[in-house]
Image (cartoon, rainbow, N blue to C red):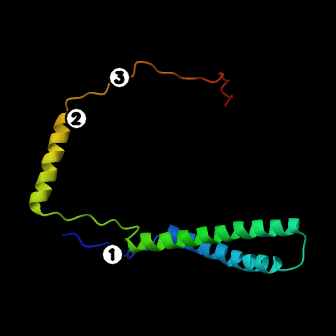
Amino acid sequence: MAEGPVPSQTPSSAITALRAELAAAIALLDPQIRGMEDLAQVSMTEETLSFVRRDFVNYSRRKTLCQAVVAALDHIEADGFPDVVRAQLPASNFAELQEQRADLLAALGQFDQAPAVKIEAELGEPTDKPAP
């Protein structure tokens, strides 16, 4: 039977770049969030405090989302991304799939695509060709 996924030996440059971008974003958010936590403790009007609290919630949510993306990247890389391993089937199962393929192709051979009956085109205004 098939084995589980094997981490890729060729990491995706796109994932590596995204990881770096997320790490940078989290590094920026951390001190901002800590600062807002501290700021919420100083004496200020309730109206001003509501803005600080609102932004604290927004920045904290953004950090949580970034961390969730990093966790998802961990999972997809553990699944072998970007490599896709071709499944190995026993001969009898492979033969069954080949029979199914042949049946599908035979059925598809009984149909033709209908020709286009109407073509719509919108042409622009004619322009003169520049002189050489």
Q: Three-letter amino acid code at disc 1?
A: Val
- Residue beneath the point at 61% across and 76% down: 23
Is 26 positioned to the left or the right of 100 in the image?
right
Q: Which residue is mark 1?
A: 6
Q: Quadrant of the N terminus?
A: bottom left
Element assignment for label 1: loop
Q: Residue furthest top?
A: 117
- Percent across and percent down for residue 24 are 65, 75
Residue that label 3 marks: 115
Residue 126 image position (x, y, % from top left):
65, 21
Rendered-image quadrant of the C terminus: top right
Three-letter code, disc 3: Pro
Can residue 13 be seen in the rendering of this structure? no
Sequence-earlier tag: 3 or 1:
1
Dot 2 or dot 3: first in sequence order is: 2
Q: Position of residue 127 (x, y in %)?
A: 67, 24
* Residue under label 2: 108
Could you say which quadrant of the image residue 29 lies in?
bottom right
